[in-house]
Amino acid sequence: MKILVTGSSGHLGEALVRTFQDMGADVIGLDIKAFVFTSTTSVFGDALRPPARTPAAWVTEAVTAIPKNICGVTKTAAEDLCLLFHRKHGLNCVILRTSRFFPEEDDNELKRQRYTNENAKANEFLFRRVELEDVVSAHIAAAKRAPDLGFGRYIISASTPFLPEDLLELNTDAAAVVRRRIPAYSEIYAQLGWAMFDKINRVYVNEAARKALDWHPKYDFNYVLQCLRKGAPPKSRISEQVGSKGYHDQLFKDGPYPV
């Protein structure tokens, strides 16, 4: 018999857990010492649309969220509920705004036409993608740090090689910036017949998460290049095990999911 006991660290809760265990039951205890909410960088939405020939957006936690779709709206509302419960009830709560980590095809039709799925996702590790294993480690780190932090919102994305001074050129000639920051990419991409995006209009910055959560992401664009050089897939073991889940159980004519 498997039994779930909520409030298992309380007076009655502990007594129930001990009694059920003595009876040979498989007991699972549930207590909120802290709450970690998985949000998304989609909450930034229309805050990430710089005009042509202007600097790309340098996205930190200081950027005000301007949701552009139902996903962003609902995630923002949930974030606000987390803040409310922290203020009213003292719930330790850490919000993780994760960038893309799913393996499915891109939702942008033009990108699907111009780049293979592997090529596009490798490019994204420069500015808007994170490996699943690093997302998992961020959640574990957030749960550990929540009692000390109380409340916080953090961007969870791969560490970028870019700097603020790159932003104008990124939004006009991204490949030139990548060649300057990571020269080795050109030869590896040429061998694969891959291409860099023409423009990069945003860069997600994970500095605050690394510092506040003591989080140490392992997977970045340099890691991807090392894997490609060896002919190995640039993904973690847990990504291989989980695989692709798909967006929906049906197909849509305009892409992998309706937008």
Image (cartoon, helix red, strand yellow):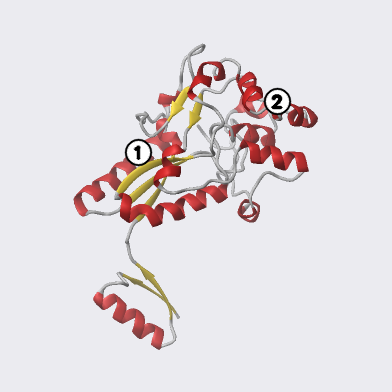
Q: Position of residue 33 (x, y in %)?
A: 32, 61
> In the rendered image of this protein, does residue 26 appear above or below residue 50?
below
* Amino acid type at mark 2: Ala
Compared across the picture, whether 103 is left or right of 30 comes to right
Q: Position of residue 107 (x, y in %)?
A: 57, 33
User: Which residue is drawn at the image coordinates 66% and 52% (left, top)?
Assistant: 240
Q: Position of residue 198 (x, y in %)?
A: 62, 19
For label 1, the residue is 76
> Which residue is the extreme one toward the top?
53
Density class for disc 1 (Cα within 10 Å; few <14, some 14-19, many ≥20) is: many
Q: Secondary structure at mark 2?
A: loop
> Which residue is the extreme one toward the right?
191
Q: Which mark is residue 222?
A: none
Q: Secondary structure at mark 1?
A: helix
Q: Quadrant of residue 43?
A: top left
> In the rendered image of this protein, does residue 249 appear above or below residue 126?
below
Compared across the picture, whether 179 is left or right of 218 comes to right
Q: Earlier in the sequence, mark 2 or mark 1?
A: 1
Q: Quadrant of residue 209?
A: top left
User: Which residue is drawn at the image coordinates 50% and 32% (left, top)?
Assistant: 259
Residue mark closest to the camera, 2 vs 1: 2
User: Which residue is drawn at the image coordinates 64% and 22% (left, top)?
Assistant: 180
Density class for disc 2 (Cα within 10 Å; few <14, some 14-19, many ≥20) is: some
> Which residue is the extreme one toward the bottom?
23
For label 2, the residue is 195
> In the rendered image of this protein, does residue 106 appear above or below residue 131?
above
* Amino acid type at mark 1: Thr
Q: CA distance from mark 2 to mark 1?
A: 34 Å
Compared across the picture, whether 87 is left or right of 167 comes to left
